Amino acid sequence: MTSHLRKERDSMGTVGVPKSALWGAQTQRSLENFSIGYEKIPIGLIHALALIKQAAAISNYRLGVLNEYERDLIVEAAISIAHGKHDNQFPLKVWQTGSGTQTNMNVNEVISNLASIASGNDLGSHKPLHPNDHVNKSQSTNDVFPSAIHISAAERITNFLLPELDKFINSLDIKSNKWQGIIKVGRTHLQDAVPISLGQEVSAWRDQVSNCKARIQDSLKELFPLPLGGTAVGTGVNTPPNFDIEITKEISLLTNLPFYSSINKFALMASHDGLVNSMSQLRILAGTLLKIVNDIRLLACGPRAGLGELILPANEPGSSIMPGKINPTQCEAMAMICTQIIGLDLAVSLAGSGGHLQMNVYKPLIGFNLLNSIELLLDSLQSCRVSMIEDMEPNRQKIHNDLQQSLMLVTALAPEIGYEKASEIAHKAYKENLNLRQAAIKLGYIDEIEFDRLTDPSSMANPHS
């Protein structure tokens, strides 16, 4: 087996690394020491780390601590990593050192070896670039790793999650406008209440999601300041003057996002409250989506023995034993994802409080849960929209029949005949299995014409229009 390995050296000695691997000794040690679980560092975080290496090389060259040849080698290798050309060279698990040092070094080692290939040197030779001395120049894992989480999360939220939320909101808006004229029974405490339009009901879902989008967008303000240039503890030791300003300017240019150098790097390195806040906004969105899909599956339950007000698209057979059964599967998938994200948020909240002195040592967990939640929400929003929301339809006949049987239309009589008499009408109709009109006429509290005028469902749903 040793014939398939090459010898790599780091500060602790030599270690055997697979001959074809682009990683080096420190990555290999992590593979052997932290063979825990199956969750790997998200590839988006790796790409963000590569972008930081690119920006650092450009900044270090400008500030005179790297030469042009070294800069170009790092930039070329970093770009190829950021573009996903070497994704299989980043095998490390989430459950490693709390700073993410091994993953930072994994990126450094791959860049070093790509430079070795480009310059005709052997893998593992550290020629012409050393992983620490050149690729990691002016950096520490302690400022680089949290910055990579900021960058990756901000990019995914801005470029993918927010646009998908816009599409989801638009789909609900289309349904809300289309269904404004469909008057139905409102429900509070899961009991019949006064009328509401189906469009009004959907408008609540639309605006709930819109509010969540605004909160998530607002949380980005805490992701744009970066602690780069703080190095080990926030002081900036081993960096040339103005490195922090130069590197964040470069990252802003590369991402087209308004990243800037944090005023107080100690705060962003000792704790990750901005990341915790972003995660909490995803959790609020998850709670909102969970409420919405639970509403939808309740309104769609049946079709014969439930509310049956919504007809959901039949995407697949719902049962292995009951022929013809159709289940609200998109609701169920979304509900599971939302429940998972609520749990992930708790872990991030605890991790965010787990720092000691100058560093939080839960960085990989925070990054994994946050980025994983963004991807789960992105995928589930698209799936729910395309496979359910856009094609769900109202069951107009069922809605009409239930509305005609509603006892809560009596609410409109209370201002005219008083609460006690209106209540008596409702109780009589319920006990004697009458409709409200029949009960009201029997009791003689109001004539037919006035009853019909006051209990018009459309007027009750839009009392001020």
Image: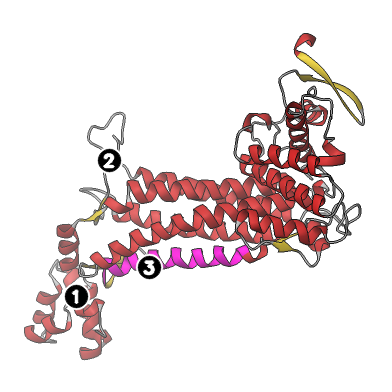
Q: Residue at x 81, y 25 (%)?
A: 124
Count the marks: how many? 3
Q: Residue at x 50, y 50 (%)?
A: 377
Q: Do we see residue 450 in this rendering?
A: yes
Q: Position of residue 31 (x, y in %)?
A: 75, 28
**Magenta span:** 196-220
Q: Earlier in the sequence, mark 3 or mark 2?
A: 3
Q: Position of residue 329 (x, y in %)?
A: 36, 43
Report the residue marked by disc 1. Answer: 457
Report the residue marked by disc 2. Answer: 326
Q: Earlier in the sequence, mark 2 or mark 1?
A: 2
Residue type at mark 3 is Ala
Q: Secondary structure at mark 1?
A: helix
Q: Residue at x 27, y 40 (%)?
A: 326
| Frontmost residue, 410 versus 162 | 162
Task: From this view, report whether residue 385 is shown above or below residue 249.
Answer: above
Q: Position of residue 81 (x, y in %)?
A: 65, 37
Q: Do we see residue 289 in this rendering?
A: no
Quadrant where the C terminus sits is bottom left
Residue 204, which numbered label?
3
Kindly report which numbered mark, 3 or 2, lies closer to the viewer in this rendering: 3
Task: From this view, report whether residue 78 is shown above or below residue 123.
Answer: below
Crowdedness near tag 1: few (<14), some (14–19) or many (≥20) residues, C-alpha within 10 Å? many
Kindly report which numbered mark, 3 or 1, lies closer to the viewer in this rendering: 3
Residue type at mark 1 is Pro
